[in-house]
Image (spheres, rainbow, N blue to C red):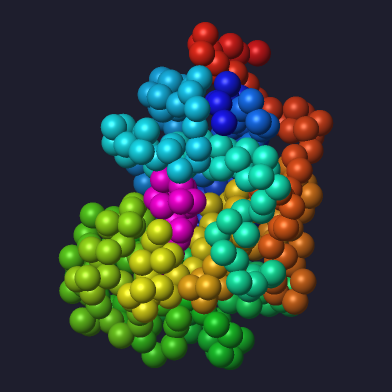
């Protein structure tokens, strides 16, 4: 397959409700989409970088810049398979979310050409996946209980509460008291330090599935130390950038569970290798979420059907995020989403709607960038 050009597009999508984490509040998304144009057909990719570098060092303007100036020039106008994208981009350090977006688009084009779905390519073992929902920090405990109750009524099979210092033990206690033994986990997005270990151990009383990323991403050894004090299994997200990082973290006992996000690790192919590593080491994984549109959601739901994705993911239905999605919506049925079966990502993009929410577009070919 020859990669002839890549279309880049920024779209603006308001969220149905503000989403607050320990690193800020989000009310809308500014998404970078990439379309790979090959001699065999086209494919879509979504970049999960946010507007600001507050979840990790990546951010959407940076991702667009590195794609145009450093990544795509290494790929354009050459014969290419999706498996060759990461090796060709290896000389560029970091920028995993940008790298993942173009690998995804090339993989989509490749699988569409072969008439093969993402699910079949990953070795999916189920045709629908159990879904959880991530609940942002709320203005009050009453708001929290109302929000969680609404999601449970919709059928979500697991609740994840965002926590930060000052919003941790009490919200967990309130949800446990009101909703009994619903599968529950928490996500700190790096908001604590090792000095908080005794405090976080207070969460042990609530039978949580896991506590996600309590400390900053580089503090991998400190997570192993915290795991000696906190009995709740520690799950790593931000710290796991690669297969190697996953292998090292497991080896030193820094985590007992891993959150897989294809964007964070540089693409679906690396994510699949991490899945296999974890299966081999007896470490369960689950699919994270980055508020994806239907494009990213389609790939994530397909990957979540792999055998070692044994915990429900942050793969919520489209209406948890957007009033109108850019593909056909993913709809929750009995707490599950269907794995798409059509070729490639198996979803189609509503091009007319896409045009109406586009804030910038450009096309990069061998002759350079054209913007319109
Ligand atoms: O359902 O897609 C979703 C959101 C899940 O909590 C979620 N994502 O830290 O994992 C996270 C968090 C996040 C969202 C991080 C957006 C960065 C950006």
Farthest top residue?
367
Q: What is the quadrant of the N terminus in the image?
A: top right
User: Residue 7: horizontal and vertical position, in percent?
Assistant: 61, 24
Q: Quadrant of residue 246?
A: bottom left
Q: Is residue 122 above or below residue 98?
A: below
Quarter assignment of residue 239: bottom left
The part of the image, by quadrant, that contains residue 110 is top right
Task: Report if residue 258 lies within the magenta region.
Answer: yes
Q: Is residue 30 left or right of residue 254?
A: right
Image coords of residue 82 (percent x, y): 50, 40
Q: Residue at x 70, y 47 (%)?
A: 115
Q: Is residue 72 visible?
A: no
Choose between 238 and 8: the one closer to the eye. Answer: 8
Q: Position of residue 153 (x, y in %)?
A: 74, 77
Looking at the rendered image, the quarter that the C terminus falls into is top right
Residue bounds of the magenta highlight: 257-272
- Residue 93 horizontal side relative to residue 221, left or right: right
Residue 276 visible to an observer of this rendering: yes
Camera-nearest residue between 151 and 249? 249
Decide which of 162, 3 is in the foreground and name it. 3
On whether residue 236 falls in the magenta region, the answer is no
Who's the residue at 69% across and 70% down the image? 128
Left or right: residue 21 compared with residue 190: right
The image shows a total of numbered marks equal to 0
**Up/down of 365 relative to 297, above or below:** above
Residue at point 55% right, 59% down? 122
Up-down: is 370 above or below 233? above
* Residue drawn at the location 65% of the way across and 72% of the way down: 126
Give residue 133's position: percent from left, percent from top: 60, 67
């Amino acid at each position: 397959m020859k990669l002839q050009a890549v279309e880049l597009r920024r779209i603006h999508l308001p969220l149905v409700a503000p989403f607050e984490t320990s690193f800020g509040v989000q009310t809308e998304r500014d998404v970078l989409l990439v379309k790979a144009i090959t001699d065999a057909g086209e494919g879509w990719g979504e970049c999960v970088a946010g507007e600001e570098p507050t979840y990790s060092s990546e951010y959407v303007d940076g991702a667009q810049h590195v794609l145009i100036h450093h990544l795509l020039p290494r790929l354009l106008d050459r014969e290419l398979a999706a498996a060759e994208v990461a090796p060709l981009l290896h000389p560029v350090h970091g920028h995993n979310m940008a790298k993942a977006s173009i690998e995804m688009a090339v993989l989509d084009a490749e699988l569409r050409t072969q008439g093969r779905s993402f699910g079949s390519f990953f070795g999916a073992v189920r045709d629908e996946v159990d879904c959880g929902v991530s609940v942002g920090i709320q203005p009050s405990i009453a708001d929290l209980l109302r929000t969680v109750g609404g999601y449970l009524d919709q059928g979500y099979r697991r609740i994840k509460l965002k926590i930060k210092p000052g919003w941790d033990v009490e919200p967990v206690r309130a949800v446990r008291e009101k909703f009994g033994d619903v599968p529950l986990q928490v996500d700190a997005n790096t908001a604590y330090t090792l000095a908080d270990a005794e405090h976080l151990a207070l969460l042990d009383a609530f039978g949580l599935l896991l506590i996600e990323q309590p400390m900053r991403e580089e503090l991998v050894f400190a997570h192993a130390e915290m795991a000696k004090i906190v009995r709740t299994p520690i799950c790593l997200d931000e710290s796991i950038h690669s297969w190697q990082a996953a292998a090292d973290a497991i080896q030193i006992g820094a985590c007992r569970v891993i959150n897989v996000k294809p964007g964070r690790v540089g693409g679906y192919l690396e994510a699949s290798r991490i899945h296999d590593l974890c299966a081999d080491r007896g470490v369960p994984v689950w699919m994270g979420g980055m508020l994806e549109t239907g494009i990213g959601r389609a790939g994530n739901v397909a990957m979540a059907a792999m055998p070692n994705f044994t915990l429900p993911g942050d793969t919520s239905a489209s209406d948890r995020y957007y009033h109108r999605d850019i593909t056909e919506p993913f709809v929750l049925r009995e707490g599950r989403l269907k794995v798409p079966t059509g070729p490639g990502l198996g979803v189609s993009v509503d091009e007319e709607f896409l045009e109406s929410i586009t804030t910038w577009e450009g096309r990069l070919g061998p002759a350079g960038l054209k913007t319109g």
